[in-house]
Amino acid sequence: MKKVLILGGSHRDIPLIKASQELGYFVITLGDRDYYFGHEYSDKYYKVNFNDLAKVKEIIESEKIDYLLPGSGEESYLNTVQLAQELNIGNLDNLETAKLVHNKWKFKEFCLKNSISTPFGFYYTDNLNLNNIEFPITVKPTNLSGGRGVEVVYDLKNLKESLLNSKELSSEVFLEEFIDGELIAYSVFIKNQKIIYGFTGKDDTYKNKYLITSAYPIQLKAVTQNRLLSEVEKIARLLSLVDGMFHLQAIIKDKVSYIIDVTRRIPGDFYPYLMEYCDKVEYSKAVVKSYIGKTLKNELVATKKQEFFIRHCVMSDKNGLFKEIEIDETLKHRIVFRIDLMKQNTEIKNFENHLIAIIFMNLLTEDKYIINNINELIRPLVV
C-alpha cells in the first residue's frame, strides 16, 4: 500500500484524509497542535510541527513516503511545494508561483499589473503618508487566512489602531480599497489552464464579519460568471498553473467581480463537501489525484440539476460555558452531516473566532427564511 503524507491534521484536513484512504492509500498526518483531531481519522500521525522541514524529511525517508499533500493552510501548502520540488514528487506549482499566489499583496500586484479585476491597493510602510487616504479602507496582512487581521476602518484614528493590531500578526500589511458588495466563493478545477469544473457559492458571516460561517450555491448573472471564468483562466495562463484545484473569493458589485483572495489548497471547514453534496462530484478525490499527478476519470462530472445544500459553522454570540446546540425541529430531519468541534461544558473565551460545530443540511430549494435566520434556528446554548 502506497503512503501519503499530509502536512496537516486539523478538522479541515479530514476531507483529504478520507479521500486518500478511499483511493487506497495509507495516510500519515503531521501537526503538533493539541486540537488537531483530524489525526484521529488518519492511519498514523506524528505530533510534530510541519514547519520543521528537516524533521519532515526524516519522516518522509523513514516512512518511505510516496506522495505529499498540503493540508488546509498557507504554511502547509508552501512547505509541501518546497519539499515536493526538492524530492521531485507530485504535481504542484513551482515554489515562486506558489509564493506569489499565497501572498495576498504579491498576488494583488500581479492582478493590478495584468488588468485582472481586483480592488485597488498599496503596500504599507512606516513612512507612508496616511493623511490623504480615502475611507473606508481595508487593512490586510499579506500571509494570513481565515480573515485574521483583516479589518475595514472608517477614519484615521481607527486606521492607525488597526495597523498596529495587524502588524502584531504579520510583518507585512497592505491597504485595499473597500468595495461594498456581495461576497462569493468560486472553486474550480483547471486542466491545461482551462476550467473543467466550477462551483459558485455565497459566503455569509455572523458576529465576525471576516470569518465565513454559512455557505451555499448561487447562480451569478451570466455576464458576471463568464467574466470571472475568463479572469481565472487568464491567471492560470499567465502563471502557468499546473492542473488541479483553484479557489478564490470575490466581491460582486454592479455585475462586476473583484477578486480579493485566492488559494491552491482546499478551502476549509469541509467546504469540499458542499460541492460534493450539491453537484454529486468527488471533489476531494480529484484534489488528491491532481496533487499526486494521477489522471482524473469521472470525479468531476456534475449532476445536471444542482441540489441545494447549506454548510453552516455553528458559532456563539458571546463567551461562556458551552452546554449544547439547540436545533429547530423544522431542520433536524434536513441534516445530512454534522461534526462537533467542541465538547460540552467547554469554556468559550473568544466567541468571534471559535467554531463549535459544522452542519450540512439539504434544503431542497433556496429557503430565504432559513438562510437569513440560521443563527437563530441553530443556536448554541452558552451560559
Image (spheres, rainbow, N blue to C red):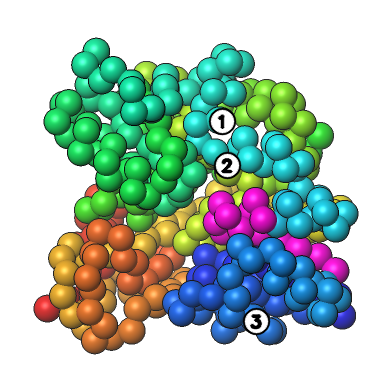
Q: Residues within 10 Å of mark 3 (few under 14, many from 20)?
A: many
Residue behind mark 3: 45
Residue at which label 1 appears = 107
Local crowd size for mark 2, using a 10 Å CA cut-off: few (<14), some (14–19), many (≥20): many
| Image quadrant where one finds the C terminus | bottom left
Q: Residue 165 location in percent, x, y?
A: 27, 45
The label shown at residue 240 is: none
Residue 97 is one of the magenta-drawn residues: no
The residue at 16%/75% (across/down) is 320
Label 2 sits on residue: 102
As measured in the structure, the alpha-carbon distance from the residue carrying label 3 to the one carrying label 1 is: 34 Å
Residue 245, horizontal then vertical, whole percent? 67, 46
Q: Give the residue drawn at x 26%, y 83%.
A: 346
Residue 68 within the segment the image draws in magenta: yes
Residue 31, picture quadrant: bottom right
* Residue in view at x 42 percent, y 59 percent: 311
Regarding mark 2 in the picture, which secondary structure is present there? loop
Residue reaching furthest to the front: 127
What residue type is disc 3 on? Tyr
Q: Where's residue 212, x and y in %?
A: 37, 51
Sequence-first tag of 1 and 2: 2
In primary-sequence order, the first of circles 3 and 2 is 3
Furthest-left residue in this view: 383
Expressed as whole percent of the image width and height from the top left, the position of residue 233 reads 68, 28
Q: What stretch is highlighted in magenta?
A: 66-79
Q: Which of marks 3 and 1 is nearer the N terminus?
A: 3
**Whole-Å distance between the Cαs marked 3 and 2?**
26 Å
Disc 1 to disc 2, C-alpha distance: 7 Å
For the N terminus, which image quadrant? bottom right
Viewer-side residue, 4 vs 47: 47
Question: In the displayed structure, would residue 292 be above or below residue 326?
Answer: above
